[in-house]
C-alpha cells in the first residue's frame, strides 16, 4: 500500500510539473506504474456487442480498458475505486483512478449526457459542452436554471472553465492527437478524464452498449445491461422480420461535401442499420468501417436507380436539393419522392436527437428504417427520428 501511495504522489507531481509531457493514461489519482499482476482477477464481464472496451472486476474494484480511444490512439485504463475504500494494493499499469460514484461530472458530449440521463444520474452533471445543442428539454431547463454550466463548444475545449467546476470526472472523447492534447492539460491538474470511443463501434448495438461502460461509474451497470438486453431483443426480432421479406429495396446514403460524396463503408454503423432493415446498400461489400470518398460520377453510375435516399444533410426539401444541383433530379429516389432525412427531432438550438438519444435506441432507428423500406411490416407506426422530405419547403 505504501509503495502505491508513494508512487501516486510522485506521479501526480510529475504530471503537474510536466503538463503535456505526461504519459498517455494519467490523470486524477494515478495508480503507480507496476508490473502486470497475475491471478488476481475475480471476474471478467465481456460486453455482448461492443468491441471497444473490456471490463475486469477485482478486489472490489473495476478496471475498464479502452484499447483505442480513437483510431490508432493509445490504450486507456480506468480503475474505479469506491469512495469508502482505500486504494487497493493491486498492480495496474498506468491506470487512471476514478473514485466512485462521482458526484460532480462534466460531459463534453450531448451523447454522454443522454446516457447519464438514461441512467438516472443527470443531476450529477455540473458542466456541459455544446449546451446549445441539447435536445432533451429537461436538461435544457437545468442549463437555463444555472444548474449546469456551459464549458464551451466541444470543438475548442479550454481547461480553465472545466477546472473551475472542480469535477470528480470528465467524460470526453478524442478523434486525434490534437484533441487529446487539450484533455491531457486537464488531466495534468489531477482531474480524471475518461475517453469514450463508442463512435468507433461498427454495430448499432455495440454503440448502445457504451451505456453499460458509463453505468460502472455509478453502480448502474446492471440497469444499463437490462436496457441493452431489452433493445437488443427488439432490434434482432425486427431485423429478422425485415430480412425475411422477398424483395429488398436499394438505398443510397449521404450527400456530397465540398465535391466529394462520403458514402458509408460496408462495415460502418449506417451500413449495418440499412442491411439489418432489409435493404440493399450499393457499397455493402466494401470492408471499410468509415466513409468512402467518391466522385459524384461514381455514385451516379452505381446508385442512379436506387429506390430510396437517406441522410441528405441539412436539406429540408427536394426542391432545396435540386436548387443546389439539378443532377440530383435524375436519381430515381428523387423523381419518385422517396428521400428521407434523420432530422425529425431538432431542438431550438439545432441539436438533433438522432445523435443524442438515438445511439441509446438503435431499435427505434431500425424501426424507422423498416417503416420506410417495408411499411407493410409496421403499418400503424409513425416515424420517430426520420421524416420524408416534401417536394417544396414548408415555409
Image (cartoon, rainbow, N blue to C red):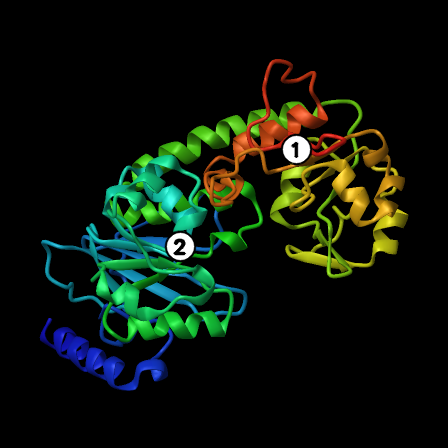
Q: Observer-nearest residue: 76 or 183?
A: 183
| Secondary structure type for disc 2 | strand
**Residue at image x 67%, y 38%?**
316
Give the label on residue 54, or none.
Answer: 2
Q: In this view, does 193 lie to the left or right of 66?
A: left
Up-down relation of residue 91 to residue 375 (above or below): below
Q: Can residue 174 be seen in this view?
A: yes
Q: Where is residue 40 in the image (x, y as percent from the top left)?
A: 24, 60
Q: Where is residue 60 in the image (x, y as percent from the top left)?
A: 18, 52
In what element is the residue under mark 1? loop
Q: In which quarter of the image is the C terminus?
A: top right
> Which of disc 2 and disc 1 is earlier in sequence?
2
Q: Residue at x 87, y 49 (%)?
A: 300
Q: Residue 3: which quarter of the image?
A: bottom left
Lateral position of residue 389 relative to residue 386, left or right: right
Does 35 appear above or below 355?
below
Few, some or many residues within 10 Å of mark 1 (<14, 14–19, 20+): few
Q: Which residue lies furthest to the top in this view?
A: 380
Gap in Å between the C-alphas at discs 1 and 2? Answer: 50 Å
Quadrant in which residue 304 is drawn: top right
CA neighbours of label 2 inside 10 A, class few (<14), some (14 to 19), many (20+): some
Q: Position of residue 189 (x, y in %)?
A: 24, 74
Q: Nearer the viewer, residue 395 or 326?
A: 395
Quadrant in the picture for the N terminus: bottom left
Q: Residue 395 carries which label?
A: 1
Query: Is any atom of residue 192 visible in this view?
Result: no
Q: Residue 377 carries which label?
A: none
- Name the one closer to the observer, 185 or 230: 185
Q: Which of marks 1 and 2 is in front?
A: 1
The residue at the point 26 percent across, 80 percent down is: 15
Residue at point 48%, 39% (across, down): 347
Amino acid at each position: 500500500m505504501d509503495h502505491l501511495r508513494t508512487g501516486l504522489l510522485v506521479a501526480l507531481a510529475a504530471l503537474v510539473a510536466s503538463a503535456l509531457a505526461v504519459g498517455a493514461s494519467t490523470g486524477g489519482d494515478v495508480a503507480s506504474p507496476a508490473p502486470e499482476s497475475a491471478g488476481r482477477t475475480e471476474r471478467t464481464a465481456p460486453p455482448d456487442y461492443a468491441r471497444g472496451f473490456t471490463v475486469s472486476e477485482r478486489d472490489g474494484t473495476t478496471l475498464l480498458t479502452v484499447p483505442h480511444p480513437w483510431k490508432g490512439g493509445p490504450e486507456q485504463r480506468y480503475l474505479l475505486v469506491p469512495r469508502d475504500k482505500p486504494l487497493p494494493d493491486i498492480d495496474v499499469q498506468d491506470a487512471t483512478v476514478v473514485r466512485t460514484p462521482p458526484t460532480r461530472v462534466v460531459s463534453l458530449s450531448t451523447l454522454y449526457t443522454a446516457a447519464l440521463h438514461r441512467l438516472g444520474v443527470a443531476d450529477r452533471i455540473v458542466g456541459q459542452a455544446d449546451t446549445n445543442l441539447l435536445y432533451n428539454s429537461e436538461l435544457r431547463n437545468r442549463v437555463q436554471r444555472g444548474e449546469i454550466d456551459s464549458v464551451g463548444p466541444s470543438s475548442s475545449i479550454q481547461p480553465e472553465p472545466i477546472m473551475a467546476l472542480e469535477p470528480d470526472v470528465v467524460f470526453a472523447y478524442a478523434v486525434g492527437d490534437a484533441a487529446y492534447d487539450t484533455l491531457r492539460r486537464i488531466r495534468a491538474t489531477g482531474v480524471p478524464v475518461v475517453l469514450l470511443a463508442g463512435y468507433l463501434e461498427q454495430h448499432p448495438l455495440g454503440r448502445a452498449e457504451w451505456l453499460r461502460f458509463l453505468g460502472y461509474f455509478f453502480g448502474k451497470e446492471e440497469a444499463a445491461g437490462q436496457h441493452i438486453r431489452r433493445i437488443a431483443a427488439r432490434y434482432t426480432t425486427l431485423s429478422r422480420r425485415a430480412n425475411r421479406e422477398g424483395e429488398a429495396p436499394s438505398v443510397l446514403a449521404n450527400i456530397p461535401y465540398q465535391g466529394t460524396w462520403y458514402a458509408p463503408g460496408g462495415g460502418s454503423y449506417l451500413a449495418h442499420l440499412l442491411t439489418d432493415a432489409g435493404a440493399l446498400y450499393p457499397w455493402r461489400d466494401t470492408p471499410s468501417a468509415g466513409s468512402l470518398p467518391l466522385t459524384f460520377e461514381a455514385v451516379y453510375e452505381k446508385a442512379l436507380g436506387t429506390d430510396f435516399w437517406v441522410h441528405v444533410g441539412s436539406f429540408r426539401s427536394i426542391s432545396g436539393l435540386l436548387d443546389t444541383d439539378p443532377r440530383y433530379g435524375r436519381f430515381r429516389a428523387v423523381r419518385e419522392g422517396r428521400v428521407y432525412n434523420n432530422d425529425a427531432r431538432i431542438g431550438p438550438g439545432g441539436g438533433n436527437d438522432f445523435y443524442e438519444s438515438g445511439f441509446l435506441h438503435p431499435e427505434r432507428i431500425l424501426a424507422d428504417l423498416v417503416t420506410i423500406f417495408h411499411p407493410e411490416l409496421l403499418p400503424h407506426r409513425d416515424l420517430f427520428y426520420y421524416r420524408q422530405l416534401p417536394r417544396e419547403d414548408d415555409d
